[in-house]
Amino acid sequence: MRSGLAKQASDAVLAMEDQRKQQAEEKARADQEEQARREKKAQMEQSMDSSAQDRQQSAQAKLADSADDSFKDFMKEEDGEDELGDADYQESANALAGATGWDQAKIEHNADAGIKQLTEAIGGKKVIASVQHMMGSLR
């Protein structure tokens, strides 16, 4: 009788150990699956962030290019810009320079530089670089 009780107790202990092992294995599998889900989610978020950054950089580059285009367009339409090689325009400009004592080339250069700085300030590369720097410091 004692031997039968000992056998039953031993079998019960072995069954409990098997049950604990199965529970531990199931928990380990569930933990691995949860970790895999987290990693996949993190990869997707990183991919989305990377894609958003790419789109943002592309938009900023287009904006910078449009600022350059704005300057070029403005300079095309600038009064007198297309007449710099014209003889009548040059004669008039030389007369004005002689009367005022100003250097025509220097004035033209300063005017072009000022217009370029203005168009860049309105929407050019310097503004974009400043915004990028500010956005980069927020990350």
Image (spheres, grey):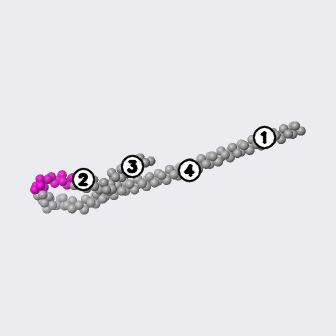
Distance, label 1 to label 3, CA atoms, is: 66 Å
**Marked residue nearer the N-terminal end (3 or 2):** 2
Q: What's the magenta region? A: 97-110
Asked if the residue at tag 3 contacts the one at tag 1, i.e. Cβ–Cβ closer than 8 Å, the answer is no
Q: Is 125 positioned to the left or the right of 41 in the image?
A: left
**Marked residue nearer the N-terminal end (1 or 2):** 1
Choose top left, top right, bottom left or bottom right for residue 67. Answer: bottom left
Please, what secondary structure does the residue beneath circle 3 have? helix
Q: Is 37 positioned to the left or the right of 58 in the image?
A: right
**Marked residue nearer the N-terminal end (2 or 4):** 4
Q: Mark 1 points at which residue?
A: 13
Residue drawn at the location 70% of the way across and 45% of the way down? 23
Residue drawn at the location 25% of the way across and 62% of the way down? 77
Q: Mark 2 points at which residue?
A: 113
Mark 4 surroundings within 10 Å by alpha-carbon count, few (fewer than 14), some (14 through 19), many (20 or more): few
Q: In the rendering, which numbered label is found on residue 40?
A: 4
**Amino acid under disc 2:** Ala
Q: Name the residue under label 3.
A: 134
Asked if the residue at tag 4 contacts the one at tag 2, i.e. Cβ–Cβ closer than 8 Å, the answer is no
- Front position among marks 1 and 2: 1
Asked if the residue at tag 2 contacts the one at tag 1, i.e. Cβ–Cβ closer than 8 Å, the answer is no
Q: Is 120 positioned to the left or the right of 8 in the image?
A: left
Q: Nearer the viewer, residue 139 or 112?
A: 139
**Amino acid under disc 1:** Val
**Amino acid under disc 3:** Met
Distance, label 3 to label 2, CA atoms, is: 27 Å
Please, what secondary structure does the residue beneath circle 2 have? helix
Which quarter of the figure is the N terminus placed in? top right
Report if residue 109 lies within the magenta region: yes
**Is residue 68 visible in this depiction of the protein?**
no
